[in-house]
Image (spheres, rainbow, N blue to C red):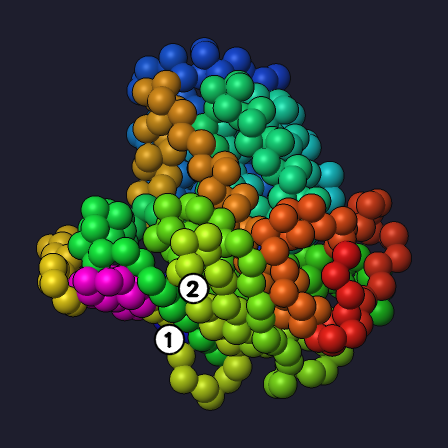
Amino acid sequence: MNTASENLTTRREFLKTSALAGGVLAAPAILPGKLFAKESSDTLRVGLVGCGGRGSGAADQALTADANVVLTAVGDAFEDRLQTCLKNLQTKHADKVKVTPGKCFVGLDAYQKVIDSGVDVVLLATPPGFRPVHLKAAIAAGKHVFTEKPMATDAPGVRSVLATVEEARKKNLSLVAGFCYRYNDGVKAIMQKIHDGAIGDVKALYTVYNTGSVWSPFPRKPDWTDMQYQVKNWYYYTWLSGDHIVEQAVHSIDKMAWTMKDEPPVKCVALGGRQVRTAAEFGNIFDHFSVVYEYANGARGFHNCRQQEKCAGDNSDYIMGADGVAHIVRAFSGPFVIKGKNAWKFHEEKPTDMYQNEHNEFFASIRKNEPINDGIRMAHSTLTAIMGRMAAYTGQEITWEQAMNSQESLVPAEMNWNVPVSVPDVAMPGRTKFV
């Protein structure tokens, strides 16, 4: 992901008419053994929860991944997003979109209606604040799940996800996460080289995710409740997005985790704030972060991310080892190179689409009865990003144990359109308390 513009048009958009206001959401359950036993001639029914750009893209990739997959149910918080998504998918996959009007669900409870609609597979692509609840419901119903990143916006959500991950394992269900770089051929190749010792012991990591702004907030309509307004503008509220270090830059933090063989950091300190997006319409998130993670072996991970217009952009990863340096440049397409004692460069004549790859592997795992469970690492990468946000918001050093055991619950306990949802003050380092 190179710039905000590229991010929004290639990552989040399925067709140009898709919008970024991804909605909220979503069967008699089929037993996992039976589902895995299906031959390629048997139809797998897919339900989509969250019909924004990323959800539309995930549905497109799911319908492309397997010859005998059909979309039978869709759900979103908002009718317009659902209809736009459905129209776009029908245009591209006319023979695979089998969604009747009775299987179109709108509202904050649409996720459960999709899950209960008779589907075999659920795609979760709502704002991440809803992810723990939706994931728990899908796994409880015995569905295979593709879930977009991140997994939660607070520590209680991460703990819920970890419990759900174990349930998925017990039920033999595939659970694939939208940490798409894990399915990028070039990144996989260079990570394998690093893990095989090509740069020696890893001493330091530097990841950067500097972009322009994301989409502009929707103006509030007179009849919108607090919840409707915030869900429409979900990116700008920490309880819904986790802030941009959690929602967007978590990809870079996940690659840092991957480099360290998914060993969590011991602690971190961070800087951050909002210099440009200072108006109330931008909710309560920051526009820049800088985090230093410390690992048990003494290695340091340095992560910078920024969403500010007319500033230098970059989305690269630099991994410094005792015998060389690995560089992941513009992480979609590379180049992926190692300089030093064991110089190397990844070559690929026909690059594959990492978004498509993850769905190809997801559906293949279902067919082969070889479940993929990305669960623990997807939850830990999410918490690593949340940990960085906690350190930046409070100005304090935060340990892994503190982050994991935090009692700060950002998501409203009651979820309906009319519940009042106040906007917390923008965090002030040194004043905002760790909870």
**Residue 188 visible in rendering:** yes
Looking at the rendered structure, which numbered label has been put on residue 325? none
Given residues 214 and 153, the one toward you in this image is: 153
In space, the residues marked 1 and 2 are separated at their CA atoms by 20 Å
SS at mark 2? Answer: strand
Whether residues under marks 1 and 2 lie with C-beta atoms below 8 angstroms apart, the answer is no
Look at 67% across and 72% down and name the residue there: 395
Given residues 23 and 149, the one toward you in this image is: 149
Examine the image and state in which quarter residue 314 appears. Answer: bottom left
Examine the image and state in which quarter residue 346 appears. Answer: bottom left
Look at 63% across and 44% down and name the residue there: 158
Residue 198 lies, in percent from the top left, at 18, 54
Looking at the rendered structure, which numbered label has been put on residue 314? 1
**Residue kind at label 2, given as amino acid type:** Arg
Split into 4 quadrants, where in the image is the C terminus?
bottom right
Split into 4 quadrants, where in the image is the N terminus?
bottom left
**Residue receiving disc 2:** 300
Callout 1 environment at 10 Å: few (<14), some (14 to 19), or many (20+)? many
Residue 21 lies, in percent from the top left, at 61, 60
- Residue 131 sits inside the magenta stretch: no
**Residue kind at label 1, given as amino acid type:** Asp
Q: Nearer the viewer, mark 1 or mark 2?
A: 2
**Residue 20 visible in rendering:** no
Residue 234 lies, in percent from the top left, at 66, 61
Image height of 176 relative to 126, above or below: above
Look at 53% across and 19% down and name the residue there: 170
Magenta residue span? 318-338
Residue 109 lies, in percent from the top left, at 73, 39
SS at mark 1? Answer: strand
Look at 77% across and 70% down and name the residue there: 432
Callout 2 environment at 10 Å: few (<14), some (14 to 19), or many (20+)? some
Given residues 101 and 259, the one toward you in this image is: 259
